Image: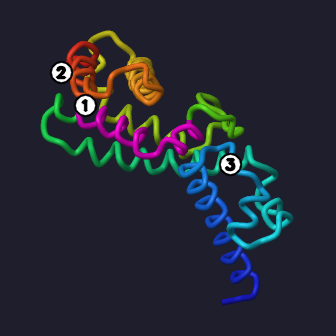
Amino acid sequence: MSVQERKQRERAERERLIVATARELAEEQGWDAVTTRRLAERIEYSQPVLYSHFRGKREIIGAVALQGAAELAAELRAASATEGTRGRVTALARAYLDFAERNPAVYDAMFQLDGGLAFAADDTPEALKDGFAALLETLRDVAGEGVEPGLFTEVFWASLHGLATLTRAGRLPVGDAEARVALLVARLAVV
């Protein structure tokens, strides 16, 4: 291995450590607790080292969001392996909501906080496009006649996001989560 390859590998490892530590700290204490000073202390690197990877907290949030989008896409695709159309759509909805519940800080980085990432644009990062594609792959078959699958997927996704956000904020009773998923699938998806 050349010196250049070793340096690139070490740089990538430092970047992974920064992102993992930011994610861990955010899940433990919230995003307000994630500062470059606190990150530097936790990973035992100086703040200038952090700034050599990320220009600030916004870029770190963006990196966590991209990582989360890749994880969510994988979970959605795994859930979509379920038998039957209704089963696939239900499993997809549950996987999305379960991800949001298990990873609140990552979910916030993806959809609530400014990570400097463009959505629904030409310069949208591939991980975000893939997250949407993971929804579309299952939902295109249940959009209904005359309904554009991408538009249907946006509405279904918005419904899931609303359920995740309102439940987490305590605006919806937790005990009715399964009934909401069943209603969403029965009323929105043509299965």
Label 1–label 3 contact, CB within 8 A: no
* Residue 80 appears anywhere in the view: yes
Residue at 63% x, 67% y: name it. Answer: 17
Overall secondary structure of the magenta stretch?
A: helix
Read off the residue under disc 2.
Answer: 191
Query: Residue 113: image x %, image y %?
Result: 64, 35
- Residue 159, by quadrant, is top left
Q: Amino acid at mark 1?
A: Val
> What label does residue 89 carry, if any?
1
User: Residue 24 vs residue 12: left or right?
Assistant: left
Closest to the observer: 157 or 61? 61
Indicate which disc, 1 or 2, sits on the residue closer to the N terminus: 1
The residue under label 3 is 33
Q: Amino acid at mark 2?
A: Val
Q: Position of residue 16 (x, y in %)?
A: 62, 65
Viewer-side residue, 92 vs 47: 47
Q: Secondary structure at mark 3?
A: helix
Residue 28 lies in magenta, yes or no? no
Q: Residue furthest right?
A: 48
How much space separates mark 1 and mark 2, taking CA atoms? 9 Å
Residue lying at 74% horizontally and 59% vertically, measured from the top left: 38
Q: Of circles 1 and 3, which is in front?
A: 3
Specify start and end residues of the magenta stretch as a single range. Answer: 89-110
